[in-house]
Amino acid sequence: MKKNALLNYFLCALFAAMTALLSQIALPIGPVPINLATLSVFIAGGLLGAKYGALSQLVYVLLGAAGAPVFALLTGGLGILTGPTGGYIIGYIAAAFITGLLAQRH
């Protein structure tokens, strides 16, 4: 495996962890809490590019789907992804991808 590829995978894991951490800084208002996870999503897309930014968020979503308490307010599991916040969380993947595409266009 190339050294650069290993670094990219490490950064994907780092941004997945950063998204998990920033999603804990939340205001529990209504069924969808307001948190700082989107900041991490946009930074991941901007710094890692479309492919690796989206991969980092896919790792985050899969960790949460597996039951790890990485979503807002230390929740996790498939029930969260099928609830009111599921669309937002799955949208993190697309948001990082689109942000990465826009960052690469300059």
Image: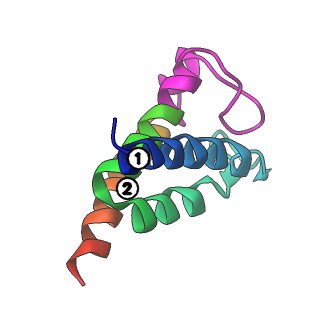
Q: Estimate how packed mark 1 is, as few (under 14), some (14 to 19) or many (20 or more) residues with alpha carbons within 10 Å.
A: few
Secondary structure beneath label 1 = helix
Q: 29 and 65: which one is in front?
A: 65
Task: Mark yes or no: residue 75 visible.
Answer: yes
Q: 86 and 23: which one is in front?
A: 23
Label number found at residue 95: 2
Q: Amino acid at mark 1?
A: Lys
Residue with the mark numbered 1 = 3
Does residue 46 lie above or below 44 as drawn? Answer: below
- Residue 2 part of the magenta segment: no
Image point (26%, 73%), residue name: 104
Q: Give the mark nearest the N terminus, 2 or 1.
A: 1
- Residue 80 part of the magenta segment: yes
Cβ atoms under marks 2 and 1 closer than 8 Å? no
Q: Which residues are magenta?
A: 61-85
Image point (29%, 50%), residue name: 51
Q: Estimate how packed mark 2 is, as few (under 14), some (14 to 19) or many (20 or more) residues with alpha carbons within 10 Å.
A: many
For residue 77, side relative to residue 6 (left or right):
right
Q: Where does the image place residue 70, in percent across and percent down from the top left? A: 67, 32
Does residue 61 lie above or below 29 as drawn? Answer: above
Image point (42%, 49%), residue name: 8
Q: 77 and 48: which one is in front?
A: 48
Q: Quadrant of the N terminus?
A: top left
Q: Amino acid at mark 2?
A: Ala
Does residue 69 lie above or below 67 as drawn? Answer: below
Quadrant in the picture for residue 72: top right
Real-space Cα distance between discs 2 and 1? Answer: 27 Å
For residue 62, side relative to residue 4 (left or right):
right
